[in-house]
Amino acid sequence: FFFFYNSKLSANPNMRLNFSKLKKFFKKNLSIFITYLSILGIILVWNIIYVQAKIYTDIQQAELDYDHEVELEYGAEVRGKRVDEEKHEFATCLICGKPAGCTVYIAKSY
């Protein structure tokens, strides 16, 4: 929070009273605000961890299910999928023929 202080206005006793009230208000409510920000931060971090774990689990499942077939057939490995957008470029899985849940990227390591 930023406050602009004018020395001419501070000569007014009502203005000093308002600053005093404002200071008391922030002293009283700052801990509540900080607690709110802390809880919000925990929620945001939890969401990020959950999303990363979900993506990691999905990619690991794809690697477990089909990575061996991909390696044998194409000589490549499952590298991951995009997290910023969900694409369904193919209706079915190219390896097993089942309905595709997501598009993963495969590549050869050099």
Image (spheres, rainbow, N blue to C red):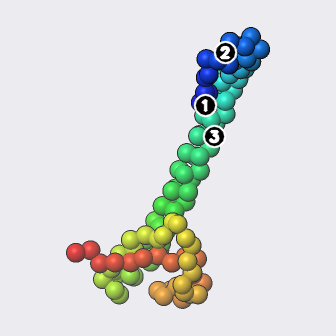
Label 3 vs label 1: CA separation?
A: 19 Å
| Residue designated by label 2 | 10
In this view, 40 is above or below 110: above
Residue 23: mark in rendering? none
Q: Position of residue 36 (x, y in %)?
A: 67, 33
Q: Nearer the viewer, mark 1 or mark 2?
A: 2
Q: Residues within 10 Å of mark 3 (few under 14, many from 20)?
A: few
How many marks on residues?
A: 3
Q: Mark 1 is on which residue type?
A: Phe
Residue annotated with mark 1: 1
Q: Is residue 42 left or right of residue 70?
A: right
Q: Residue at x 52, y 66 (%)?
A: 84
Which callout, 3 or 1, points at the residue further toward the start of the chain?
1
For this view, does 107 lie left or right of residue 6?
A: left
| Dot 1 and dot 2 residues touching (CB under 8 Å) | no
Is 39 drawn above or below residue 32 in the view shown?
below
Residue type at mark 3: give it: Leu
Q: Which mark is residue 40?
A: 3
Precedes in sequence: disc 1 or disc 2: 1
